[in-house]
Image (cartoon, rainbow, N blue to C red):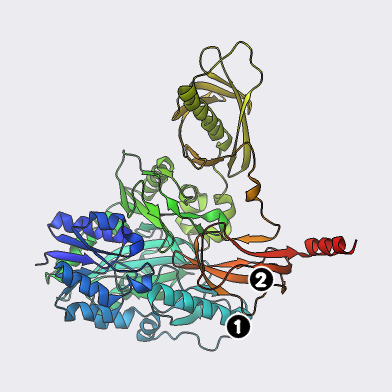
Amino acid sequence: MISTVLVANRGEIACRVFRTCRELGISTVAVYSDADAGALHVREADAAVRLPGAASSETYLRGDLVVKAALAAGADAVHPGYGFLSENADFARAVTAAGLVWIGPPPAAIEAMASKTRAKELLGIAPLTDVTEADLPVLVKAAAGGGGRGMRIVRELADLEGELAAASAEAASAFGDGEVFVEPYVENGRHVEVQLLCDAHGTVWALGTRDCSLQRRHQKVVEEAPAPGLPAALEASLLDTAVRAAKAVGYVGAGTVEFLVADGRAHFLEMNTRLQVEHPVTEEAFGVDLVALQLSVAEGRALPPEPPAPRGHAIEARLYAEDPARAWAPQTGVLRLFELPAEGRTRLDTGYVSGDTIGVHYDPMLAKVIVHAPTRAEAVRKLARALERARIHGPVTNRDLLVASLRHPEFGDPGLLDTGFYDRNLDALTETPAGEEYAAVAAALAAAAANRGHFGGGWRNLRSQDETRTYDGGVGEHEIRYRPTRDGGYAVTAPEGVGVVAVTPDRVRLEVDGVVRDVDVTAYEDGTVHAGRHRLTRRPRFTDPREQTAPGSLLAPMPGTVVRVADGLAVGDRVEAGQPLLWLEAMKMEHRVIAPASGTLTALHAAPGRQVEVGALLAVVSDDATTDAAQEDQTV
């Protein structure tokens, strides 16, 4: 019997495994990097062992350090979670060689399937080698790992060499393995997968299908079980193929076989020899605990001959600290408030709580929000409502995008689901939710009420002019004008048509077009104000001249590390609009910084290895008009 489990991972998955261990009476051990010293998974574990350093390559990818940590803490088993070392056969062997129980598949099965290139060879599928124009578009893909890292779509042959190098560098950073390969890119198919669970006695469970078609940057955003609208014959074929793949390699434990479905045909993508991020929707649909079953299998127990029958529909949304309207740029900072509505059966798998800091070193996923209902339509409605009513203060998140996605007509029709959803709809989905100007009104009145409480004041017989507060939001500037009234309330003069029912420093009740709504308001010291679902920034009365930047300045869109500068790039060079100048790595992804216009590079402050904060000046490109004007000034 397993008594103590070390989870060789961090964040949400570590907390999720700990939860099941606690329910089973199993003690838990966390490992953590210096960047994660105060993380939730460390606080929730019974014991924790430091892995010195911050980078993944120095910490969570060091199998030797993880095994030493397990032995030092008295663990007798290791659960790898997902990512990092979860599909590393050498790590699995090191765990068992140390006398520990490995909660995962046999190393030989990992080697057969964890590498996408070897998995395809096993199934008789050869990767592309000599790519020609006729093969385009193609997908460059990391042989190891997942989560969309190390993947690039190539539509122009001239781009292939550069994208191979970029994908390899990203894969090496994320997984410790820079091997990449090329395969045909199937446009706008459905991403469907089959959850497997196998014991050491020959029993193989195929726990239905999942649809994971809503993706950004090849990383899943919304997942559901069962995959809706699949023809019965196709679904049976997917289940049969997955079972045959598991039996072919003597698979034991939890695993997933992934397919791309297009034109009624299923194309094998890969087998993930680990627990998947989206496993909760299968748990909810089948009424099982996959982590508990993993532990049972690792202890040598047999599964029942048949899995339980599925029931209803489950759906999950991944909540990320990122800005979808700015090329999915990851966000960092303090998560000041993180609350889901109390009512309803909403499951939250997370590695963060209010007050935690979102750093730059790891994936920006904050949580997974999961609901179950008798039908798909009911589940989608419940999830959208839960996300809409969540209170998330701090860095920008994809919450509004998720709500809009779930309510989009295309998502409501399973026949329209495919991986091109965001390519087609992103602009419309990232529009600021309606009502931002009224949120600004609430913010202004709440601030006025707070100031009145602190400093006194109110209505006077001789009023000189309206009070004014200005906020920046997703649709621009909102100038709010109001005045105190004789009865101790407020009257809004701009925008017009807003009635004030009640005001306190943290809640404002407004009437617009005969409809009364409450708006919760929280203001923070840095000028950020959260009013309902809206995130606003209080504009100061006077602009700080130090905030002025030269035209053409390239500022770091996020905190991170400069990993590359374009070959030979130097001050004085001519650059073209859209030309990549340098690459930043943040949260395990590479981000290109491009020239905003054609012109001359007049400053370059970036160098490989340099750590930068958001807003740091990286380079300056003087566009042609600016350069010509400067030259004319010099000749006058």
Which label's residue is closer to the chain start, 2 or 1? 1
- Residue 428 as seen in the image, left or right of residue 111: right
Position of residue 307 measured from the top left corner of the image (x, y, whole percent):
20, 63
- Residue 288 as seen in the image, left or right of residue 444: left
- SS state under label 2: loop
Quarter assignment of residue 290: bottom left
Position of residue 80 measured from the top left corner of the image (x, y, whole percent):
26, 69
**Few, some or many residues within 10 Å of mark 1 (<14, 14–19, 20+):** few
In the depicted structure, whether residue 114 falls above or below residue 75: below
Marking on residue 134: 1
- Residue 409 as seen in the image, left or right of residue 118: right
In the depicted structure, whether residue 35 falls above or below residue 97: above
Tag 1: amino acid: Ala
Farthest top residue in view: 461
In the depicted structure, whether residue 164 falls above or below residue 264: below
For the question of whether residue 250 can be seen, the reply is no
- SS state under label 1: helix
| The N terminus, quarter of image | bottom left
**Residue indicated by mark 2:** 579
- Residue 171 as seen in the image, left or right of residue 477: left
Q: Residue at x 41, y 62 (%)?
A: 363
Front residue of this view, candidates 598 and 197 = 598
